[in-house]
Image: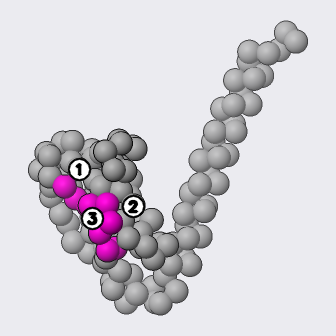
Amino acid sequence: MINCEFEKGQMILYEGDIRQSIFIVKYGSDKCFKGIKEVKILGSRDFLEKAVLFNTNRSLSVTVIEISICYQISESLLIDIIGEEFRKLLFLFWVKFLLRIVNIWNYYLMKFFRENFRKF
């Protein structure tokens, strides 16, 4: 694992790059672009894993908004630590994370409806 520091305006990843590492944002914020369209903003604890997870090239470019410190974990390190099946483990983690987001969203949606539509 490598601790990387990026300056404002610096590119971290380019769309179409061959995947080699997962990046986890420790500090700072970064913009993600698909072509010229801004897709999302990353902050602390966000990570860029999709290309490694799905064994594809990078689907986004990422540029630094403010100084960012990221952990870079190489694909080879993941294989050394977890084994050749690391993609399956990461995929399960990813699905679990998405399900947690859906559950949180569902909780607040139901709370909103209970509070705002009691009269009906």
- Depth check: 74 or 11 in front? 11
Q: Quadrant of residue 73?
A: bottom left
Say which amino acid is labelled 3.
Tyr
Residue at 41% of width from left, 69% of height from top?
A: 51
The percent position of residue 18, horizontal first and vertical second, equals 32, 74
- Which portion, as a residue range, is magenta? 11-19
Q: Alpha-carbon neighbours of circle 3 within 10 Å: few (<14), some, or many (≥20)?
A: some
Q: What element carries label 3?
A: strand
Distance from disc 3 to disc 1, alpha carbons, whole Å, reads 16 Å
Q: In which quarter of the image is residue 96?
A: bottom right
Q: Residue at the spot x=33%, y=50% of the render? A: 35
Q: In this view, does 114 lie to the left or right of 90?
A: right
Residue located at (26% from left, 61% from top):
13
| Residue 118 % position (x, y) | 83, 14
Q: Which residue is drawn at 19% across and 55% down?
A: 11
* Badge number at residue 71: 3
**In the image, residue 36 above or below residue 53:** above
Quadrant holding the C terminus: top right
Local crowd size for mark 2, using a 10 Å CA cut-off: few (<14), some (14–19), many (≥20)? some
> Which amino acid type corresponds to the residue marked 1 in the rendered image?
Thr
Q: Earlier in the sequence, mark 3 or mark 1?
A: 1
Residue 93 in the image: x percent, y percent?
Answer: 55, 67
Query: Is the residue marked by circle 1 packed among few (<14), some (14-19), or many (20+) residues within 10 Å?
Result: many
Say whether disc 3 or disc 2 marks the residue closer to the N-terminus. 2
| Residue that label 1 marks | 63
Which of the labelled discs sits on residue 59, or is there none?
2
